[in-house]
Amino acid sequence: EPEVTQTPSHQVTQMGQEVILRCVPISNHLYFYWYRQILGQKVEFLVSFYNNEISEKSEIFDDQFSVERPDGSNFTLKIRSTKLEDSAMYFCASKGGEAFFGQGTRLTVV
Amino acid sequence: ELKVEQNPLFLSMQEGKNYTIYCNYSTTSDRLYWYRQDPGKSLESLFVLLSNGAVKQEGRLMASLDTKARLSTLHITAAVHDLSATYFCAVDMWNYGGATNKLIFGTGTLLAVQP
């Protein structure tokens, strides 16, 4: 069965550092997403990506965040100058007809 | 802005009992997902409901979708402890031909099945 792969599974970073979260979507899917889940809370939409550009972003997705599809397969989320409140689980998803989610990256900012 | 509300937010039930989790949403959509999440884990896809009147069953769980009422239900039959988890519904903002194509998640229902 096709799957969405995320790396790393867990990332610890110091406040103010930049992190890059990586995702390999399902190969024939056209829509890609990043979601965030703060511990114990709901899953929040961050950004969607279609046709090599951002199609929609939420209020959370400010200038601190950026996404790229650098090589036609990987899909990355970059968080510049991390803050303590960025600590969360970050999920990547891709969608053809049905949406599939990756296993998540747990980001801990200390 | 689409709102997706689940109730109850927390459900404690005894093994062997039946119960229903409700998912209401505020705009037109004919696609809805149900996910299970164990603590610290990812989202496990349970059901994808793709049309009005869709009903799917897997083991002790059954999901249905009423797009006219903007309501989906997840029914638990004869609960067992292994079903303890958080359950999320997610409405697919499918916009044919458009770029708006995201899932909006409900608040989640924490299910605790007591022996």
Image: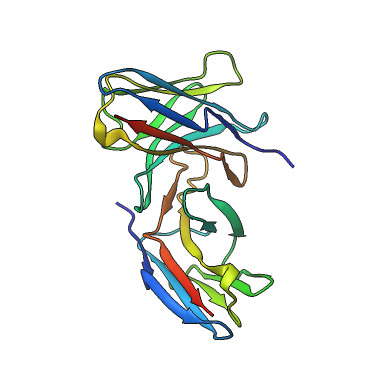
The answer to whether A83 is drawn above or below residue B65 in the figure is above
Q: How many marks?
A: 0
Q: Position of residue B38 (x, y in %)?
A: 51, 56
Q: Residue at x 30, y 22 (%)?
A: A14
Q: Residue at x 61, y 72 (%)?
A: B61
Q: Is residue B107 left or right of residue B43?
A: left
Q: Residue at x 52, y 67 (%)?
A: B84
Q: Nearer the viewer, residue A22 or B113?
A: B113
Q: Nearer the viewer, residue B41 or A56?
A: B41
**Image quadrant where residue A26 sits:** top right
Q: Position of residue A15 (x, y in %)?
A: 26, 23
Q: Position of residue B24 (x, y in %)?
A: 39, 68
Q: Position of residue A35 (x, y in %)?
A: 42, 40
The answer to whether B84 is drawn above or below residue A89 in the figure is below
Quarter occupied by the C terminus of chain A = top left
Residue that sits furthest to the top in the current view:
A71
**Image quadrant where residue B69 sits:** bottom left
